[in-house]
Image: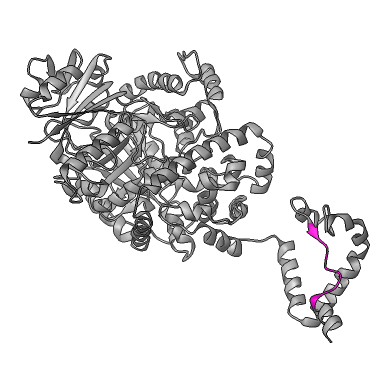
Amino acid sequence: MTGGGAPMSELLHRFAERAGDYRADVRLCSQAELPGVLSGLLGKEVVLPQGVPPEWVAGLATIVDDGLSPADLDRPQLSVLTGCAVAIAQTGTLVLDGGPGQGRRLLTLVPDHHVCVVFAHQIVADVPDMFTALPDPTRPLTMISGPSATSDIELNRVEGVHGPRRLDIVCVIDK
Amino acid sequence: MTGSAQPRRVVALGMPRHATGPLAAPITAPEPFADAAARKLKDTQLRANLGHATRTIRDKRAAVVAEVDDWEALRDRAAAVKDDVIARLPELLARFASAATAAGATVHHAADAQQANDIVLGLVQAEQADRVVKVKSMTTQEIGLNEVLEAAGIAAIETDLAELIVQLAHDKPSHILVPAIHYNRSQIRDLFALRMPGFAADSDDPAQLAGAARRYLREQFLSAQVGVCGANFAVAETGSLVIVESEGNGRMCLTLPRTLIAVVGIEKLVPHMADLGDFLRLLPRSSTGERMNPYTSIFTGVTPGDGPQQLHIVLLDNGRGAVAADPVGKQALRCIRCSACLNVCPVYERVGGHAYGSVYPGPIGAILSPQLTGQQAGHNRSLPYASTLCGACYDVCPVKINIPEILVHLRQTGPKPLAERQLMSALSWVMRDRRRWKAALRAARAGSAPLRLMTRRRGHTLRRAPWPLSAWTAHRDAPLPAQESFRDWWRRTHE
């Protein structure tokens, strides 16, 4: 799915640049490099939603969400690892719809560190393309553009209010 | 109307009526705009804070809007979608209500603020909650929900940073997007030190202040039973609600509590999910000057195992039906509350939001408040005059509301004081007849002759005139009538 018909590599690079503009840390890698990149990013405690492929986290200690409480997730050392449903190049936005590998909405909200894996084929050009790319837009959708931020004090942008203060995005270049 | 949780299946808009009664207070100016503005102009700190903030946001907006090639086409499409919604409100409301109900939400209809507050209070009491966590919402401010909840012993905790600042200060919001725009960082630090339990920060660095708010609010989020929100958009086709935010406080309120109550103005509807594509490109750029805000949540009814398991949606009219019936004024219902018009308004930039006496300040407030309440309410008839008609608000409006046109329309149709009406009808009688007009001009020349000597050095303009003309000369010079009329000059030199 390449939205406006632009070549995939162009969308991928635009996505990476725009997500970086909003202070997400973005890395590009191949499918084979993914586990290595993830183990470098993830902390000691990692929470996963159901449906994350086991090979992504081979060798890491992980907890799979089976109804963890918000208090369980509210610990400083905790990272959460998810995939996404769609990503938007123009705005550097991740879109999660609660599908496999994404989980409940609070999983990507309460922990202080979110690592999200995006495959190049999931990137669409702009916001309107998202609605055609999503399998079912009536699932609970969360659009994420950079870490939590506020501009409420003198309209200066400050990263990190209530959501995860660190957002790492790993873009996987499809073969 | 009762506070019962039974869905009402009939969409009864009934006769359009204005928002009235004591509960219209949040959108009713308690004093004439000119009086409030004159006082606010003397607050130099306020003007400095506002000048800095509005300049910052104007520049950011201009940069991200310039990136969009089809911005004008986008505005046209969004305006057309909203006009279609306004024309088909009853039909789309019924569609929204049945789709949301099918998805597991309970839909309530409120004709005015009183009904909406009764419904929400009833729901919170049924949950036996002693407090609610709130997402920033203009609609709940419009109906004065926090005050109603607090009178019933229920704490309404604002979780947006700026709303929290305003709430801790026992102040009122002064901007739609940045309610605490009138505070600078050192004022905020002092306020937190005074009023925020457990506050500790050694500087007034915004990051430290935001960190303090994070720690303070986290316990509230983790223990709250009930969340209250508004909505940026409501999708008729699917019954979905959209919340656009930055901090994550919205996501906290939308996912952690067991019960969520959304108070949604009926003009927030869009027909289809696909319509959001354009609006989500327009809103963040116009609002915070970002390509996209950090978090947007779109949710449809109740999802088992994810988020609140009870969702109540209160659809609020509160004067909107009456606005929809005005052929010129109805454009105001297109508004998506981005606040771009505030940031470019030369009047707002100098007087700030409080001078408008309504939770809706600035150019949009000047057309929205008097239309929602009717111009007779309080001093709302003075708001359409809170403008120079420069048109900057129209230029930046993402849904192309012709604000100057509505301002003029409201000035023309609004109530006028008796003296002004008498003066205008006398003037109309004089100007209808050439001889009467000529005689009047001659009298004015003769009457002002003694003043010509006094005002010679100032180009024959009067700085201060006696009452009632002093109302005019308080802010402008009054030119004296010309010594000779054009007709007299022509006769003297050409005939």
Pick whichever, B323 or A92, lies toward us. Answer: A92
Name which residue lies at 29% across and 44% down: B241
Q: Quadrant of residue A12?
A: top left
Q: Nearer the viewer, residue B326 or B132?
A: B326
Closer-to-camera residue (B23/A159): A159
The magenta span reads B478-486
Residue at 35% x, 58% y: name it.
B73
Q: Is residue B249 above or below residue A73?
A: below
Task: Please indicate whether residue A74 sits to the left or right of residue B481 in the image.
Answer: left
Percent position of residue B219, x then y: 35, 19
Is residue B139 visible to us here?
Answer: no
In the figure, residue A81 lies in which quadrant? top left
* Residue positioned most to the bottom: B495
Task: Give whichever of B363, B410 is nearer the camera.
Answer: B363
- On the image, the x and y values in percent for residue A22 come to 33, 32
- Is residue B172 within the magenta segment? no
Query: Residue at (26%, 37%) from the top-left corner?
Result: A93
